[in-house]
Image (cartoon, rainbow, N blue to C red):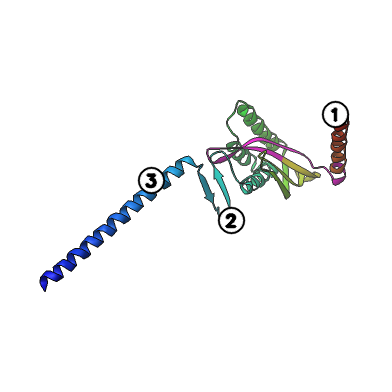
Amino acid sequence: MQYEKWIRSWKSALAENFFLRSLSLLMAISLIITSYYSVRRPQRVLVIPPQVTKDFWTEESRVSPELIEQTATFISIMAGNLSPANADYNINTLIKYYLANPDRREIVEELQGQAAYIKKNNITQTFFPSMVTVDESRMQASVEGVAATSIGNVKTSQDKVSFKMRFKARNYRLWVEELYMEQAKSKKEKDKNKDKEEDRGKSAENKED
């Protein structure tokens, strides 16, 4: 009787041992496959930052349009809201977003000169963004809104403007390559420019014919 119990216990131990070995083998194979594909496929990081309404992801040299949109909005607010009190801080923050390139030193000097000019002349500029347009394929964004400028307590201008930006993704980060502000075009001007482009296209087609 005890012999039969011992046989049953021995068989149970063998079955349990076989199960554990099989499970370990499957886990090892799964780990190898996962490691292989993680090396071959581009890494993607999913980011859910606090107090931001949209998720976004980053890869080594590519980012989601949501990240471009939110970064462009942040950059436009930092560049569009300047005063003697915050000019140095905002400008130094913007400088950190510029990709290191041969023109970076000139860009830094220009931005620092802008901060000094604002402080010297007691200029205050405010910007209220209203619309963001993203071109994912070209890594470009345009933030439109209203900018108001004052010297001291005197309001000197209030215009519709657009901050234009071009980005580059590198090492899971989004960098600014180009940033400038221009007067926003009215719908009439946009339609006029569109008609001109269409006319140029038709002229080119007629020449080919």
Q: Is residue 150 visible?
A: no
Q: CA distance from mark 1 to mark 3?
A: 58 Å
Q: CA distance from mark 2 to mark 1?
A: 54 Å
Q: Which residue is mark 3?
A: 32
Residue 207 x, y percent position in the rendering:
87, 28
Q: Does 82 appear in magenta?
A: no
Q: Which residues are magenta?
A: 164-189
Out of 187 and 61, give the one closest to the viewer: 61
Foreground mark, 2 or 3, reads 3
Looking at the magenta stretch, what is its main secondary structure?
strand
Residue 126 x, y percent position in the rendering:
72, 46
- Against 57, residue 205 (above or below) is above
SS of the residue under disc 3:
helix
Q: Which residue is mark 2?
A: 51
Quadrant of the rendered image containing residue 39? top left
In the rendered image, the quadrant that contains the C terminus is top right
* 80 to the left or right of 13: right
Amino acid type for the residue under numbered disc 2: Gln
SS of the residue under disc 2:
loop
Out of 88 and 68, give the one closest to the viewer: 68
Residue 151 x, y percent position in the rendering:
76, 41
Quadrant of the rendered image containing residue 110? top right
Q: CA distance from mark 2 to mark 3?
A: 38 Å
| Of callouts 2 and 3, the N-terminal one | 3
Q: Residues within 10 Å of mark 1 (few under 14, many from 20)?
A: few
Give the numbered dot on residue 208: 1
Foreground mark, 1 or 3, reads 1
Q: Residues within 10 Å of mark 2 (few under 14, many from 20)?
A: few
Q: Residues within 10 Å of mark 3 (few under 14, many from 20)?
A: few
Foreground mark, 2 or 1, reads 1
In the rendered image, the quadrant that contains the N terminus is bottom left
Give the numbered dot on residue 182: none
